[in-house]
Protein backbone atom coordinates (compact mmCIF):
# COMPACT_ATOMS: atom_id res chain seq x y z
CA UNK A 1 0.00 0.00 0.00
CA UNK A 2 2.78 2.45 0.90
CA UNK A 3 4.47 1.82 -2.43
CA UNK A 4 1.24 2.74 -4.20
CA UNK A 5 0.83 5.94 -2.19
CA UNK A 6 4.42 6.92 -2.92
CA UNK A 7 3.45 7.48 -6.54
CA UNK A 8 1.50 10.60 -5.54
CA UNK A 9 2.83 11.46 -2.08
CA UNK A 10 6.13 11.78 -0.25
CA UNK A 11 5.31 9.20 2.42
CA UNK A 12 6.56 9.27 6.01
CA UNK A 13 5.64 6.07 7.89
CA UNK A 14 6.24 6.93 11.54
CA UNK A 15 6.57 4.42 14.39
CA UNK A 16 5.30 6.49 17.29
CA UNK A 17 6.23 5.58 20.89
CA UNK A 18 5.05 2.13 21.91
CA UNK A 19 5.39 0.73 18.40
CA UNK A 20 8.06 -0.49 16.02
CA UNK A 21 11.66 0.61 16.32
CA UNK A 22 10.90 3.74 18.34
CA UNK A 23 12.21 3.44 21.88
CA UNK A 24 11.53 5.82 24.75
CA UNK A 25 12.99 6.34 28.23
CA UNK A 26 11.49 4.50 31.18
CA UNK A 27 9.77 7.65 32.42
CA UNK A 28 8.32 8.71 29.06
CA UNK A 29 4.65 9.69 29.53
CA UNK A 30 2.47 7.51 27.27
CA UNK A 31 -0.15 10.20 26.71
CA UNK A 32 -1.82 11.66 23.65
CA UNK A 33 -0.47 15.09 24.55
CA UNK A 34 3.15 13.93 24.77
CA UNK A 35 3.11 11.67 21.71
CA UNK A 36 1.08 14.20 19.72
CA UNK A 37 3.58 16.95 20.52
CA UNK A 38 6.46 14.72 19.39
CA UNK A 39 4.67 13.96 16.12
CA UNK A 40 3.98 17.66 15.64
CA UNK A 41 7.68 18.40 16.15
CA UNK A 42 8.52 15.71 13.57
CA UNK A 43 6.34 17.44 10.96
CA UNK A 44 7.85 20.82 11.79
CA UNK A 45 11.49 19.74 11.93
CA UNK A 46 11.68 16.92 9.35
CA UNK A 47 8.85 17.42 6.84
CA UNK A 48 8.92 21.22 7.24
CA UNK A 49 5.66 21.75 5.40
CA UNK A 50 1.95 21.23 6.11
CA UNK A 51 1.17 17.53 5.70
CA UNK A 52 -1.71 15.24 4.89
CA UNK A 53 -2.02 13.00 7.95
CA UNK A 54 -3.71 9.66 8.40
CA UNK A 55 -3.69 7.24 11.32
CA UNK A 56 -5.44 4.02 12.28
CA UNK A 57 -6.98 3.33 15.70
CA UNK A 58 -4.93 5.19 18.32
CA UNK A 59 -3.13 6.72 15.36
CA UNK A 60 -6.47 8.20 14.34
CA UNK A 61 -6.79 9.80 17.76
CA UNK A 62 -3.29 11.25 17.40
CA UNK A 63 -4.17 12.49 13.92
CA UNK A 64 -7.14 14.33 15.45
CA UNK A 65 -4.80 15.73 18.12
CA UNK A 66 -2.46 17.09 15.45
CA UNK A 67 -5.28 18.69 13.47
CA UNK A 68 -6.60 20.42 16.59
CA UNK A 69 -3.31 21.39 18.24
CA UNK A 70 -0.92 21.93 15.31
CA UNK A 71 -3.30 23.28 12.65
CA UNK A 72 -0.56 25.09 10.72
CA UNK A 73 1.19 21.74 10.17
CA UNK A 74 -1.83 19.82 8.86
CA UNK A 75 -3.53 20.22 5.47
CA UNK A 76 -6.21 17.54 5.87
CA UNK A 77 -6.70 14.36 7.88
CA UNK A 78 -8.07 10.87 7.41
CA UNK A 79 -9.20 9.31 10.69
CA UNK A 80 -9.07 5.55 10.04
CA UNK A 81 -11.54 3.88 12.42
CA UNK A 82 -10.41 5.75 15.55
CA UNK A 83 -11.90 4.84 18.96
CA UNK A 84 -13.41 8.27 19.48
CA UNK A 85 -15.16 8.49 22.87
CA UNK A 86 -14.97 4.69 23.25
CA UNK A 87 -11.32 4.92 24.37
CA UNK A 88 -12.15 7.36 27.16
CA UNK A 89 -12.81 6.25 30.72
CA UNK A 90 -15.16 4.86 31.87
CA UNK A 91 -16.63 3.98 28.44
CA UNK A 92 -13.55 1.96 27.45
CA UNK A 93 -14.44 -0.61 30.10
CA UNK A 94 -17.39 -1.64 27.89
CA UNK A 95 -15.18 -2.43 24.86
CA UNK A 96 -13.38 -5.50 23.57
CA UNK A 97 -10.18 -3.45 23.43
CA UNK A 98 -10.20 -3.10 27.21
CA UNK A 99 -9.63 -6.86 27.53
CA UNK A 100 -6.50 -6.59 25.40
CA UNK A 101 -5.28 -3.56 27.32
CA UNK A 102 -5.72 -5.54 30.54
CA UNK A 103 -3.02 -7.89 29.19
CA UNK A 104 -0.80 -4.89 28.40
CA UNK A 105 -1.30 -3.57 31.91
CA UNK A 106 -0.37 -6.92 33.46
CA UNK A 107 2.65 -7.29 31.17
CA UNK A 108 3.89 -3.80 32.00
CA UNK A 109 3.49 -4.31 35.75
CA UNK A 110 5.19 -7.71 35.65
CA UNK A 111 8.06 -6.47 33.51
CA UNK A 112 7.56 -9.22 30.92
CA UNK A 113 10.65 -9.68 28.73
CA UNK A 114 8.89 -11.25 25.73
CA UNK A 115 5.54 -9.54 25.45
CA UNK A 116 4.61 -11.17 22.12
CA UNK A 117 4.65 -14.69 23.58
CA UNK A 118 2.99 -13.43 26.77
CA UNK A 119 0.23 -11.80 24.71
CA UNK A 120 -0.38 -14.94 22.62
CA UNK A 121 -0.63 -17.09 25.75
CA UNK A 122 -3.06 -14.59 27.28
CA UNK A 123 -5.17 -14.28 24.12
CA UNK A 124 -5.95 -17.89 23.22
CA UNK A 125 -9.66 -17.21 22.52
CA UNK A 126 -8.66 -14.55 19.97
CA UNK A 127 -6.46 -17.00 18.07
CA UNK A 128 -9.05 -19.78 18.36
CA UNK A 129 -11.53 -17.48 16.57
CA UNK A 130 -9.25 -15.92 13.98
CA UNK A 131 -6.71 -18.67 13.21
CA UNK A 132 -8.01 -22.00 14.52
CA UNK A 133 -8.57 -23.93 17.72
CA UNK A 134 -5.35 -24.58 19.58
CA UNK A 135 -3.39 -22.30 17.24
CA UNK A 136 -1.79 -20.28 20.06
CA UNK A 137 0.58 -23.14 20.91
CA UNK A 138 1.51 -23.70 17.27
CA UNK A 139 2.14 -19.98 16.75
CA UNK A 140 4.36 -19.84 19.83
CA UNK A 141 6.51 -22.68 18.48
CA UNK A 142 6.62 -21.10 15.01
CA UNK A 143 7.75 -17.77 16.46
CA UNK A 144 10.52 -19.40 18.49
CA UNK A 145 11.69 -21.30 15.41
CA UNK A 146 11.61 -18.16 13.25
CA UNK A 147 13.64 -16.21 15.77
CA UNK A 148 16.30 -18.91 15.89
CA UNK A 149 16.58 -18.83 12.12
CA UNK A 150 16.34 -15.02 11.78
CA UNK A 151 17.85 -13.45 14.90
CA UNK A 152 16.95 -9.79 15.29
CA UNK A 153 14.52 -9.78 12.35
CA UNK A 154 10.82 -8.81 12.71
CA UNK A 155 8.68 -11.92 13.18
CA UNK A 156 7.10 -13.01 9.89
CA UNK A 157 4.81 -16.06 9.98
CA UNK A 158 4.06 -16.42 6.29
CA UNK A 159 1.80 -19.48 6.64
CA UNK A 160 -0.88 -17.43 8.41
CA UNK A 161 -3.81 -17.03 6.03
CA UNK A 162 -5.28 -14.12 7.97
CA UNK A 163 -3.08 -11.23 6.83
CA UNK A 164 -4.35 -8.89 9.55
CA UNK A 165 -3.35 -11.39 12.27
CA UNK A 166 0.02 -11.91 10.57
CA UNK A 167 0.69 -8.18 10.59
CA UNK A 168 -0.65 -7.91 14.13
CA UNK A 169 1.89 -10.49 15.33
CA UNK A 170 4.67 -8.66 13.49
CA UNK A 171 3.68 -5.43 15.22
CA UNK A 172 3.29 -6.94 18.68
CA UNK A 173 6.83 -8.29 18.41
CA UNK A 174 8.06 -4.71 18.89
CA UNK A 175 5.23 -3.40 21.07
CA UNK A 176 5.73 -1.63 24.39
CA UNK A 177 2.98 -2.79 26.79
CA UNK A 178 3.21 0.52 28.63
CA UNK A 179 1.27 1.99 25.70
CA UNK A 180 -1.76 -0.26 26.21
CA UNK A 181 -1.47 0.02 29.97
CA UNK A 182 -1.98 3.78 29.63
CA UNK A 183 -5.32 3.16 27.91
CA UNK A 184 -6.26 0.63 30.58
CA UNK A 185 -5.76 3.05 33.47
CA UNK A 186 -6.96 6.10 31.55
CA UNK A 187 -3.72 8.08 31.69
CA UNK A 188 -3.33 8.09 27.88
CA UNK A 189 -6.23 10.55 27.58
CA UNK A 190 -5.08 12.82 30.41
CA UNK A 191 -5.68 16.38 29.19
CA UNK A 192 -7.07 15.07 25.89
CA UNK A 193 -10.83 15.41 25.61
CA UNK A 194 -12.12 13.83 22.40
CA UNK A 195 -15.17 16.08 21.97
CA UNK A 196 -13.26 19.29 22.61
CA UNK A 197 -10.53 18.17 20.20
CA UNK A 198 -12.98 17.44 17.38
CA UNK A 199 -14.63 20.83 17.83
CA UNK A 200 -11.29 22.57 17.22
CA UNK A 201 -10.47 20.78 13.94
CA UNK A 202 -10.90 23.22 11.07
CA UNK A 203 -9.17 21.38 8.21
CA UNK A 204 -10.98 18.83 6.01
CA UNK A 205 -11.40 15.55 7.88
CA UNK A 206 -12.52 12.16 6.56
CA UNK A 207 -13.86 9.83 9.25
CA UNK A 208 -13.61 6.21 8.11
CA UNK A 209 -15.82 3.82 10.08
CA UNK A 210 -15.22 0.05 9.81
CA UNK A 211 -17.12 -3.01 11.03
CA UNK A 212 -18.60 -2.83 14.50
CA UNK A 213 -20.84 -5.14 16.50
CA UNK A 214 -22.11 -5.33 20.05
CA UNK A 215 -21.72 -8.61 21.92
CA UNK A 216 -24.56 -10.19 23.86
CA UNK A 217 -23.28 -8.70 27.11
CA UNK A 218 -23.20 -5.18 25.65
CA UNK A 219 -19.45 -5.12 24.95
CA UNK A 220 -18.46 -3.01 21.93
CA UNK A 221 -16.51 -5.10 19.41
CA UNK A 222 -15.10 -2.41 17.16
CA UNK A 223 -13.59 1.05 17.37
CA UNK A 224 -16.76 3.05 17.92
CA UNK A 225 -20.50 2.57 17.82
CA UNK A 226 -22.67 4.23 15.19
CA UNK A 227 -23.84 6.68 17.84
CA UNK A 228 -20.24 7.63 18.62
CA UNK A 229 -19.42 8.06 14.94
CA UNK A 230 -22.51 10.26 14.53
CA UNK A 231 -21.47 12.34 17.54
CA UNK A 232 -18.00 12.80 16.07
CA UNK A 233 -19.48 14.00 12.80
CA UNK A 234 -21.71 16.47 14.61
CA UNK A 235 -18.61 18.06 16.14
CA UNK A 236 -16.40 18.23 13.05
CA UNK A 237 -16.76 21.57 11.25
CA UNK A 238 -15.46 20.26 7.93
CA UNK A 239 -16.03 16.53 8.20
CA UNK A 240 -16.91 13.78 5.74
CA UNK A 241 -18.14 10.36 6.83
CA UNK A 242 -17.59 7.04 5.07
CA UNK A 243 -18.80 3.68 6.31
CA UNK A 244 -16.57 0.94 4.87
CA UNK A 245 -17.04 -2.82 4.62
CA UNK A 246 -13.75 -3.72 6.28
CA UNK A 247 -12.19 -4.83 9.53
CA UNK A 248 -10.60 -2.38 11.96
CA UNK A 249 -7.25 -2.04 10.17
CA UNK A 250 -8.85 -0.92 6.93
CA UNK A 251 -5.61 -0.35 5.02
CA UNK A 252 -4.66 -4.02 5.55
CA UNK A 253 -8.08 -5.51 4.92
CA UNK A 254 -8.98 -3.37 1.88
CA UNK A 255 -5.74 -1.68 0.74
CA UNK A 256 -6.92 -0.75 -2.76
CA UNK A 257 -10.18 0.76 -1.53
CA UNK A 258 -8.40 2.59 1.27
CA UNK A 259 -5.82 4.04 -1.13
CA UNK A 260 -8.52 5.24 -3.50
CA UNK A 261 -10.47 6.90 -0.69
CA UNK A 262 -7.33 8.58 0.63
CA UNK A 263 -6.17 9.87 -2.75
CA UNK A 264 -9.61 11.10 -3.74
CA UNK A 265 -10.09 12.94 -0.48
CA UNK A 266 -6.65 14.46 -0.09
CA UNK A 267 -5.82 15.28 -3.72
CA UNK A 268 -9.12 15.53 -5.56
CA UNK A 269 -11.30 16.98 -2.81
CA UNK A 270 -13.81 14.15 -3.26
CA UNK A 271 -15.81 14.43 -0.06
Image (tube, grey):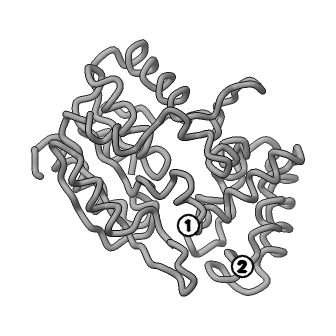
The residue shown at (79%, 49%) is: 150
Quadrant of the image occupied by residue 20 = top right
Frontmost residue, 147 versus 86: 86
Please name the residue that numbered disc 2 is placed on.
125
- Contact between marks 2 and 1 (CB within 8 A): the answer is no
Rendering coords of residue 224 (x, y %): 41, 63
Between circles 2 and 1, the one closer to the viewer is 1
Quadrant of the image occupied by residue 72 = top left
The residue shown at (32%, 69%) is: 226
The residue shown at (89%, 48%) is: 110
Is residue 201 positioned above or below 47 on the image?
A: below
Rendering coords of residue 215 (x, y %): 53, 82
Report the Cα–Cα distance between label 2 and label 1.
Answer: 16 Å
Say left or right for 64 vs 62: left
Quadrant of the image occupied by residue 67 = top left
Q: Does dot 2 land on a helix, a strand or a loop? A: helix
Q: What mark, if any, has residue 70 been given in the picture?
A: none
Frontmost residue, 21 versus 92: 92
Q: Does dot 1 land on a helix, a strand or a loop? A: loop
Is residue 32 positioned above or below 73 on the image?
A: below
Dot 2 or dot 1, earlier in sequence? 1
Please name the residue that numbered disc 1 is placed on.
95
Is residue 45 positioned above or below 1 on the image?
A: above
Amino acid sequence: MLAGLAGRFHVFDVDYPGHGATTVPAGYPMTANRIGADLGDFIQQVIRAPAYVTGNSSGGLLTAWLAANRPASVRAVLLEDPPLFSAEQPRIQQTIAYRSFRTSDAGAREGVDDFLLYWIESSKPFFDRNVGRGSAFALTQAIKSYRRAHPGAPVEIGLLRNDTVRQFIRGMDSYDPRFGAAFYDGSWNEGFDHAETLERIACPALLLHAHVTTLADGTLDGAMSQQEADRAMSLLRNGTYRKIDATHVVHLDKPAEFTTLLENFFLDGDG
